[in-house]
Image (tube, rainbow, N blue to C red):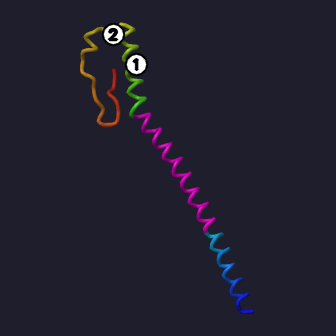
């Protein structure tokens, strides 16, 4: 009789352990997914600042050239903003 109760006790503890592991697995999965979402949002913001903004500025400069801004104005140095990640400002 003692062996049978010991077996049930071990079985119950294994079942409890498996349930705890499954719950931990779910928590880790949710955490990884939420972290990935945050990183994607932050990465897209940085990509926009670093890549898209300079391209937009280049397009604006190209439009101004096509509209006939004098070459004298274009020879003026481009003013740089203080932020190192930002692109040059075009006036």
Q: What element carries label 1?
A: helix
Left or right side of 12 for 87: left
In the rendered picture of this protein, how many numbered marks are placed on residues? 2
Vertical placement of residue 68 versus 83, above or below: above
The one nearer the camera, 43 or 19, is 19
* Residue name at image x 40 percent, y 31 percent: 51
**In the current view of this chain or complex, which residue is farthest to the bottom?**
2
- What number is the disc on residue 60? 1
Dominant secondary structure of the residues highlighted in magenta in the image: helix
**Range of the magenta residues?**
21-49
Instruction: Specify the quadrant of the image occupied by residue 47.
Output: top left
Q: Is residue 39 above or below residue 82?
A: below
Query: Which label was assigned to residue 1?
Result: none
Residue 22 percent coordinates (x, y): 63, 65
For the residue pair 5 and 17, the one nearer the viewer reads as 5
In this rendering, position of residue 24 left or right of residue 39: right
Q: For mark 2, what is the residue?
A: 69
Nearer to us in this view, 59 or 24: 24
Image height check: is 20 above or below 27?
A: below
Label 2, secondary structure: give it: loop
- Asked if residue 25 is among those painted magenta in the image, a careful observer would answer yes
Estimate the x, y position of residue 53 in percent, counting from the top left: 41, 29
Q: Is residue 64 magenta?
A: no
Mark 2 / mark 1, whichever is N-terminal: 1
Q: Residues within 10 Å of mark 2 (few under 14, many from 20)?
A: few
> In x, y percent, where is residue 63?
40, 13
Residue at 65 percent across and 79 percent down: it is: 13
Instruction: Determine whether 44 is above or below 12 in the image.
Output: above
């Amino acid at each position: 009789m003692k062996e049978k109760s010991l077996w049930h006790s071990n079985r119950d503890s294994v079942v409890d352990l498996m349930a705890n592991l499954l719950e931990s697995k779910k928590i880790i999965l949710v955490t990884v997914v939420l972290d990935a979402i945050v990183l994607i949002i932050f990465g897209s913001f940085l990509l926009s600042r670093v890549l898209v903004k300079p391209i937009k500025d280049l397009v604006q400069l190209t439009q101004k050239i096509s509209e006939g801004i004098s070459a004298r104005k274009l020879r003026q140095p481009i003013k740089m903003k203080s932020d190192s990640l930002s692109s040059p400002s075009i006036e």
